Image: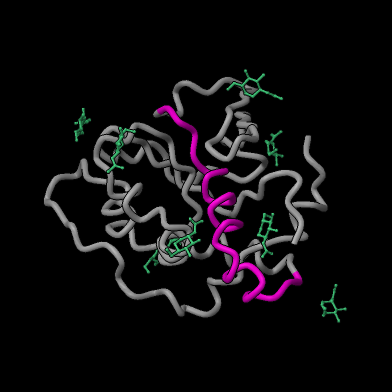
Amino acid sequence: MQNKSVYFILLLVVAASGTYASPLFHTYRSSSNDTIAAELEKMKNFTTLLSLAKIANLTSTFENASLAVTLFAPTDSGISSTLKAVNISASAIEKNSTLVKMILEYHVVPEPLKTSKFSALNSYKTLEGSNITVTKNSTGIFVNGVPIIKKNVKADKSIIQVIDGLLIPPGIVV
Ligand SMILES: *[C@@H]1O[C@H](CO)[C@@H](O)[C@H](O)[C@H]1NC(C)=O
Ligand SMILES: *[C@@H]1O[C@H](CO)[C@@H](O)[C@H](O)[C@H]1NC(C)=O
Ligand SMILES: *[C@@H]1O[C@H](CO)[C@@H](O)[C@H](O)[C@H]1NC(C)=O
Ligand SMILES: *[C@@H]1O[C@H](CO)[C@@H](O)[C@H](O)[C@H]1NC(C)=O
Ligand SMILES: *[C@@H]1O[C@H](CO)[C@@H](O)[C@H](O)[C@H]1NC(C)=O
Ligand SMILES: *[C@@H]1O[C@H](CO)[C@@H](O)[C@H](O)[C@H]1NC(C)=O
Ligand SMILES: *[C@@H]1O[C@H](CO)[C@@H](O)[C@H](O)[C@H]1NC(C)=O
Ligand SMILES: *[C@@H]1O[C@H](CO)[C@@H](O)[C@H](O)[C@H]1NC(C)=O
């Protein structure tokens, strides 16, 4: 497993500011099978994630209906609860869009994964390049130990798995 202490060296503090909280995505469709961006908007709890996507220039990716990926999507409250374990300035993260992009890409696996695919222990390579570990036990399903709290949200060809915290790629230091 990755060094847990590394995870806590570095976290996103954009949540607290709300600076980027303006609506970024304007394409709403009535279907329940919409783009990742639109599904995140509909679920309400992803203001921070959508803001980070803008910083990382991933907005058009999240609006791409041809995309077929899994997004492990951290909620606003998940990100802020992770932030409580952290002691780093917001600006240090916000101003480094490369860093934000790496972190977000660590939440994306380039194939759609329903939770029915998961066994007790699974490893998936993310777009960032490092693997995440998905585990399943009687308590639930976890990504690097962070629980999936809403399963299998369809977003066009992609799937959103909502998680209750932020995943930090190994080896990242600010
Ligand atoms: C999602 O947002 C709603 C409305 O803002 C809130 O009541 C709910 O607690 C949030 N859920 C999570 C998991 O953050
Ligand atoms: C959308 O995603 C598909 C599949 O990954 C890709 O081939 C296409 O280039 C993307 N379109 C844009 C505008 O990025
Ligand atoms: C948090 O960071 C500040 C400023 O760098 C430092 O003074 C303080 O000791 C740190 N606190 C913890 C708990 O690491
Ligand atoms: C995002 O776009 C801005 C403006 O074009 C650019 O300065 C920045 O380097 C880009 N960041 C990434 C991660 O692509
Ligand atoms: C931004 O973050 C990346 C990844 O951690 C790092 O390699 C790079 O040096 C950082 N850039 C600045 C200007 O701090
Ligand atoms: C990363 O996950 C892939 C499967 O997606 C697996 O083939 C590979 O062995 C894993 N790598 C490590 C270092 O666990
Ligand atoms: C299931 O895994 C999670 C995450 O690793 C852990 O916190 C929890 O204690 C485990 N539950 C059981 C019943 O082993
Ligand atoms: C959702 O829409 C996409 C096209 O945007 C389609 O490929 C996919 O099969 C649809 N999924 C479901 C479950 O309807």
Quick check: 167 above or below 81?
above
Residue 142 in percent (x, y) is at: 60, 38
Q: Quadrant of residue 153?
A: top left
Left or right relative to 169: residue 1: right
Quick check: 110 above or below 2?
above
Image region (quadrant) for ligand 5: bottom right
Residue 30 shown in magenta: no
Residue 167 in percent (x, y) is at: 62, 49
Give the position of the N terminus as an image quadrant: top right
Q: Residue at x 41, y 62 (%)?
A: 54
Which is nearer the eye, 19 or 140?
Answer: 19
Q: Residue at x 53, y 23 (%)?
A: 118
Quick check: 89 above or below 105?
below
Which is nearer the eye, 71 or 59?
Answer: 59
Give the position of the C terminus as an image quadrant: bottom right
Q: Residue at x 52, y 80 (%)?
A: 17
Residue 110 shown in magenta: yes
Residue 101 in percent (x, y) is at: 53, 53
Quick check: 66 above or below 106?
above
Q: Residue at x 73, y 44 (%)?
A: 170
Q: Quadrant of residue 136?
A: top right
The residue range painted magenta reads 87-111
Residue 3 in percent (x, y) is at: 82, 44
Left or right relative to 124: residue 33: left
> How many marks do you count on the picture?
0
